Image (cartoon, grey):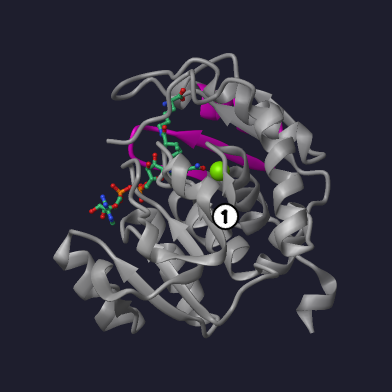
């Protein structure tokens, strides 16, 4: 089970600042703009109640504090409840939270109590990282490679297929690959096919999943995967741009996915 560690959460906003600069350079957009356009929504001073959950492996040091810092970074008012679990949920509602955020070991949700919208971190992470890859300014075609078709990767492949990209994918889990071929129309990517990509979305819990034969001269690797799927030597040898960040971008995507629609998107 791929759980965050307190080390992953160190220097979170420094990592975000670096990745925001990369995203602006490689797509021309700010992360907020990409989120707003992807979901057609906008923030409206929502109050976010963050509830620590003790089930399973229990509290992850700094996880809820990191969420509060992320919520505040995006201009909203966030608070971590004093109580955990059900008591914490009750406290968040009594403190007039508009949006509840909480995670056990399996699912991390954002739930907007006002409009009923609910989203999961896995799906929102897949959507936003594939959207970033898809906006690469130096893309040489609409071919895009998704490595890993699990909870995050499948959501990303689905988002890209809906946008009309030519999605190739690979995953050692044959069932996941066959499901993506059948339901999304993705093309299985053969590692020794010699086909190279300028856009790669990597969503696996394994390191060095990206090999030299996959990478075009100019390439954007957009990866939430922990640890990093791009070997350092390949990143150096080719002009590979990389967006990789352990939590914040996915959480921003969760927030925008539950905001109200922008008026201009309503007509
Ligand atoms: P998952 O376990 O549901 O799916 C991972 C998939 O990768 C599996 O289907 C597996 O067969 C496949 N895989 C493993 N090795 C591979 C390889 N060499 N080539 C191709 N596919 C391979 O995991 P999930 O939930 O989709 O998360 C993926 C990664 O993203 C994990 O490392 C997780 O910690 C991370 N994550 C990061 C977030 C962020 O904001 N940065 C948020 C959520 C998850
Ligand atoms: O501190 C707490 O409230 C814990 N219950 C939080 C557990 C989060 C477990 N999930 C993860 O570590 C990963 C993250 C990348 C986001 C999704 N799953
Ligand atoms: Mg992230």
> Can residue 32 be seen by looking at this rendering?
yes
Of the 4 image quadrants, the one containing the C terminus is bottom right
| Mark 1: secondary structure | strand
Of the 4 image quadrants, the one containing the N terminus is top left
- Looking at the rendering, which quadrant does residue 110 occupy? top right
**Residue 207 pos. (x, y %):** 34, 41
Q: Give left or right: position of 143 versus 91.
A: left
Q: Which residue reaches farthest left?
A: 174
14 in the magenta segment = no
**Residue 242 pos. (x, y %):** 58, 50
Q: Give left or right: position of 48 versus 140.
A: right
Range covered by the magenta-colored residues: 88-109
**Residue 82 pos. (x, y %):** 59, 14
User: Disc count in the image?
Assistant: 1
The residue drawn where x is 43% and y is 22% is: 5
**Residue 134 pos. (x, y %):** 59, 70
- Looking at the rendering, which quadrant does residue 248 occupy? top right
Along the line of sight, the residue nearer the viewer: 51 or 248: 248
Along the line of sight, the residue nearer the viewer: 110 or 188: 188
102 in the magenta segment = yes
The residue drawn where x is 31% and y is 61% is: 149
Q: Residues within 10 Å of mark 1 (few under 14, many from 20)?
A: some
Along the line of sight, the residue nearer the viewer: 45 or 91: 45
From the viewer's perspective, is residue 48 above or below residue 52? Answer: below
The residue drawn where x is 44% and y is 19% is: 60
Residue carrying label 1: 240
Q: Is mark 1 within 8 Å of ligand 1?
A: no
> Can residue 97 be seen by looking at this rendering?
no
């Amino acid at each position: 089970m791929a759980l965050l560690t307190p080390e992953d959460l160190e220097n979170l906003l420094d990592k975000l600042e670096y990745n925001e600069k990369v995203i602006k350079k490689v797509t021309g957009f700010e992360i907020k703009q990409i989120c707003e356009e992807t979901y057609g929504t906008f923030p409206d001073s929502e109050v976010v109640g963050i509830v620590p959950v003790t089930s399973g492996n229990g509290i992850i040091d700094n996880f809820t504090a990191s969420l509060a810092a992320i919520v505040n970074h995006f201009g909203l008012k966030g608070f971590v409840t004093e109580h955990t679990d059900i008591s914490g949920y009750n406290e968040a509602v009594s403190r007039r939270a508009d949006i509840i955020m909480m995670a056990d070991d399996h699912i991390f949700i954002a739930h907007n109590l006002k409009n009923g919208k609910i989203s999961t971190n896995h799906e929102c992470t897949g959507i936003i990282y594939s959207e970033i890859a898809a906006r690469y300014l130096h893309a040489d075609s609409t071919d895009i490679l998704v490595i890993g078709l699990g909870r995050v990767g499948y959501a990303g492949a689905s988002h890209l297929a809906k946008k009309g990209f030519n999605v190739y994918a690979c995953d050692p889990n044959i069932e996941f690959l066959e499901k993506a071929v059948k339901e999304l129309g993705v093309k299985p990517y053969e590692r020794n096919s010699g086909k190279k990509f300028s856009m790669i979305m990597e969503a696996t819990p394994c390191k060095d999943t990206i090999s030299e034969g996959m990478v075009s001269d100019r390439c954007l690797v957009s990866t939430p995967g922990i640890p990093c799927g791009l070997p350092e030597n390949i990143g150096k040898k080719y002009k590979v741009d990389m967006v990789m960040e352990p939590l914040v971008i996915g959480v921003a995507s969760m927030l925008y996915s539950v905001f109200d629609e922008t008026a201009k998107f309503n007509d």
